[in-house]
Amino acid sequence: MLDVKDLVVCFRSKEGIHEVVHGISFSMEDGEILGLVGESGSGKTQTVLAIAGLSPINAVIGGTITLNGQELSLLSRHEMRTVQGRDISMVFQEPMTSLNPTMRIGRQVEEALRIHTKLSPEERKAKALQTLADVELPNPEAVYNKYPHELSGGQRQRVMIAAAIICDPKLLIADEPTTALDVTIQAQILKLLKKLNKTMHMSILFISHDLGIIRRLCDNVMVLKSGDIVERGSVDQIFNNPTEEYTKRLIAAIPSRKRGITTDEHRSYYEYFGFLEYDDSDDELEGPF
Amino acid sequence: MSYAKHNWYMIFGAVITFVMVLLIVVGYFWTPYSPTAICAAERFDGPSFAHLFGTDNLGRDIFSRVLDGAGTTLFISVSTVLIGLITGILIGGLTGYFGGWIDEVVMRMNDSLTAFPSMLLALVIIGILGPGTYNVIIALGIMFIPSFARMVRSEFVRCKNLDYVKSARLMRAGPLRIIFLHILPNTRSTLLSAVAIGFNNAVLAEAGLSYLGIGVMPPQASLGRMLSESQSYLFSAPWYSISTGFTIILLILGFTLLGEGIRQQAGVD
Ligand SMILES: Nc1ncnc2c1ncn2[C@@H]1O[C@H](COP(=O)(O)OP(=O)(O)OP(=O)(O)O)[C@@H](O)[C@H]1O
Ligand SMILES: [Mg+2]
């Protein structure tokens, strides 16, 4: 579905050109949840921004990105709008700045419909309310008319997800979407993402520092180290048999309870955090809510 | 957040400004006497019930003239601020949002315009265009553009990297949609307080130009013009300069308090 080949991201500055992503290649299947981990500054955000076409103005991008067989750099502006703008969407880290403070929630959730569809205002509103219900916001009618400052962090993140999925994107990019939330809310949002992934067959590219979260949410993991992919594989493979020293260090950096290397430790981590009941038989996210 | 503290700046500013504007609007349709009616028998009458603020050197009713003159001053200020604001939003918004070399070029031009003392710039423009109400508006409007443009630009630079603007870009919303729909409303508190300060400066600048005799031309009244006339009779008819000066002070005070109030309000939430 998504195919990234030799992706290079450079920054131009007065001192010259400085490369932060060094020709990485990877691909994603339909419905896959791919985790992207790596220490701060390893280039995770720049990689996904390049895929979304949102790189900073001083960035130079190389390589090819193919979405459903269409190479993004070859598209005309108009095609770009439908392909990149409609099929890829993104949820950001900070729920405080990811919603426009002067726009009502309903208006923001509908924005993608205004741009990409010819629905009438009534149809848009119905679809927005439906989507707000899909992200499990209680009382969508009331939320629809509110401003962001009237919502909690977790509610805002749900609104953000609603705005991101309203046009049925093929790929949802989530750049540390739960880092700013407290642990219980985090678990709810993760559960929601997992549910949307199942019901909407939407692939998710999930960035996180928290390997515990990656382990529970993702199918596969990709480890990025200063702009290179050092390891990629299924969650089990990476967590149980990390081959690279760097990956081992990342795993070791998780507090021992969170490490999730053995089943016992794994279980105690989730019990400790109290947000996910650990269930060996079923790899679904289950929370006490 | 939990308890509401009264924003006294806002309240006083709004009340003063409202009363002044109301008087001016009334004065536009009705004044006790014609502001230009000369009456030789009533020269330099002190304040009385017939003439609240007394009469001037030509026996004209000062209260009527103050209402009329404040209207002229306000009209000039509003037009001036609008020119500065709209042009500033266009220039600042486009350069701030797009950045790059256009930004560099326009902002350097802006800088060079700012390098002139602003009054001098207005004097030069009037020198070229000649005096008169509309030329004053043009001169002051141009004088105001750089500061508005700079402020709008910095707000746009701040906002364009926020996540909600990134989401709009990801959806491929057009640049104009992003500039006017997604970013501009978020600059409103900064803009509003700048507008209030702008009015303030405009009132002063108009008064200054008219005082120098190169602004509004007689017999049209404006506060600056009247203040300049009144100084010849400072001792024989003090009510003339006092009532005119006081009106200017009230206008400016209202706008200043309003601007400060808006600024504080924005800081609160
Ligand atoms: N606008 C920019 N100009 C120049 N260099 C930049 C710019 N943005 C990011 N970088 C550099 O790119 C590198 C990768 O940054 P990136 O934001 O992708 O890291 P990250 O893996 O997302 O880190 P974090 O986990 O802290 O979010 C960093 O070394 C950073 O200094
Ligand atoms: Mg990042």
Image: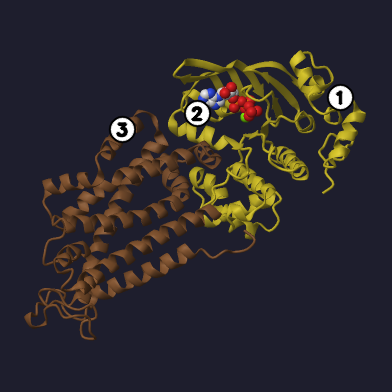
Chain colours: A yellow, B brown
Q: Is residue B234 left or right of residue A204?
A: left
**Which one is in front, A134 or A205?**
A205
Q: Looking at the picture, how far across and down is residue B45, in whole percent?
A: 16, 80
> Relative to B1, is B84 above or below?
above
Residue in the picture at 76% in, 22% down:
A250
- Mark 2 and ligand 1: say if the CB distance to the nearest ligand atom is below 8 Å: yes
The residue that label 2 is drawn on is: A56
Q: Is residue A199 left or right of residue A82?
A: right
The residue that label 3 is drawn on is: B108
Task: State the CA–CA distance, disc 2 to disc 1.
Answer: 38 Å
- Residue A219: give its label: none
Kindly indicate the quadrant of the structure image that contains residue B207. Answer: bottom left
- Of the 4 image quadrants, the one containing the N terminus of chain B is bottom right
**Marked residue chain, label 1:** A
**Marked residue chain, label 2:** A
Residue at far front of view: B235
Q: Quadrant of ligand 1?
A: top right
| SS class, disc 1 | loop
- Of the 4 image quadrants, the one containing the C terminus of chain B is bottom right
The crowding category of the residue bearing disc 1, from other C-alpha atoms within 10 Å (few below 14, some 14 to 19, many at least 20), is some
**Marked residue chain, label 3:** B
Q: Looking at the picture, how far across and down is residue A9, in whole percent?
A: 54, 20
Q: Nearer the viewer, mark 3 or mark 1?
A: 3
Task: State the CA–CA distance, disc 3 to disc 1.
Answer: 59 Å
| SS class, disc 2 | loop
- Mark 3 and ligand 1: say if the CB distance to the nearest ligand atom is below 8 Å: no
The residue that label 1 is drawn on is: A261
Q: Is residue A70 visible?
A: no
